[in-house]
Image (cartoon, rainbow, N blue to C red):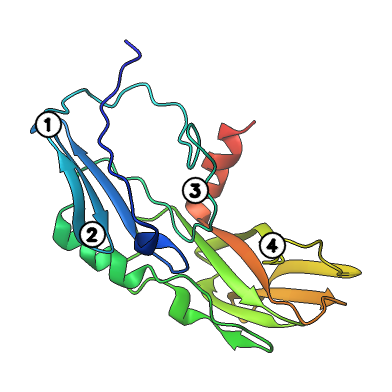
Amino acid sequence: STSFDRIEQLAQISDFKGKWNHWAFTKNVATGEMKIYLNGSLWHSGTGKDQELSQITQVKLGCGYGFYEGKVAHLRIYDRVLSQEEIDELMKVNQPATTPTTGETDATSTTDETDITQKPMEYRIYQVKGNPTIKTGYSASEWTAVIAGFNSGAKQKHKASALTIMPVVEDEEWKIKCDLKDTDDRYWDVAVLFIRNNMVNTISNFYR
């Protein structure tokens, strides 16, 4: 069958525009409950939704009715239903890294303070200007850093004549070296994917 369960509610512009928000979506097949949480609080719910989630091959954001216009700082998928208390705690610690950086910067405030031993990957967005060195707080003995992308943060075409963004290891810590020239004093968003070292070979074999 190609049918699926769904709950929906029209969001007001004031619910999401111009600010960071934490959305969480849960489904309990046993009880038939589906819930949507906005910033740790129940925003919408439905019952009688007991179709199993099986044979899922891909996940898409912002497609079908229109594209998503915005940025995503974190995306996590769990194999169980989180409680409202757990969602509220995740909302508190998953703050996006938006502090502008112009020199060598300690970015430890962008890292979750919860136990990360069970998280195979972490996704971070740093905002930079000029030629900073970002101190990520991620240990090279535990993590591998991969540059996932960058964005000028402006709709107009960027004017950078030279741009280099490179992860390096210094003092056993991953740091991001940025060389941004002729950027017209604009801030850049740099996305970094951190993969636990014991998962690197697994991911490499998966994509071969």
Disc 3 to disc 4: CB gap under 8 Å: no
Q: Residue furthest left?
A: 31
Label 3 sits on residue: 199
Label 2 sits on residue: 87
Q: Position of residue 58 (x, y in %)?
A: 47, 31
Give how far apart the Cα atoms at labels 1 and 3 are.
Answer: 34 Å
Give how far apart the Cα atoms at labels 4 and 1 are.
Answer: 41 Å
Mark nearest the camera among 4 and 2 is 4
Q: Earlier in the sequence, mark 4 or mark 1?
A: 1
**SS label for mark 3:** helix
Mark nearest the camera among 3 and 4 is 4
Q: Amino acid at mark 2?
A: Ile
> Horizontal placement of 117 versus 50: left or right?
right
Q: Which residue appears at 73% of the width and 75% of the height?
A: 177
Label 4 sits on residue: 151
Q: Amino acid at mark 1?
A: Gly
> Horizontal placement of 121 versus 47: left or right?
right
Q: Earlier in the sequence, mark 1 or mark 2?
A: 1
Q: Which residue appears at 37% of the width and 21% of the height?
A: 55
Give how far apart the Cα atoms at labels 3 and 4 are.
Answer: 27 Å
Label 1 sits on residue: 32
Q: Which residue appears at 52% of the width and 40% of the height?
A: 202
Q: Earlier in the sequence, mark 3 or mark 4?
A: 4
> Horizontal placement of 39 versus 129: left or right?
left
Q: Which residue appears at 61% of the width and 33% of the height?
A: 207
In-front residue for pair 74/106: 74
Give how far apart the Cα atoms at labels 4 and 2 are.
Answer: 29 Å
Q: Position of residue 144 (x, y in %)?
A: 58, 60
**SS label for mark 1:** loop
Give how far apart the Cα atoms at labels 2 and 3 are.
Answer: 26 Å
Disc 3 residue crowd, few under 14, some 14–19, many 20+, Cα 10 Å: few
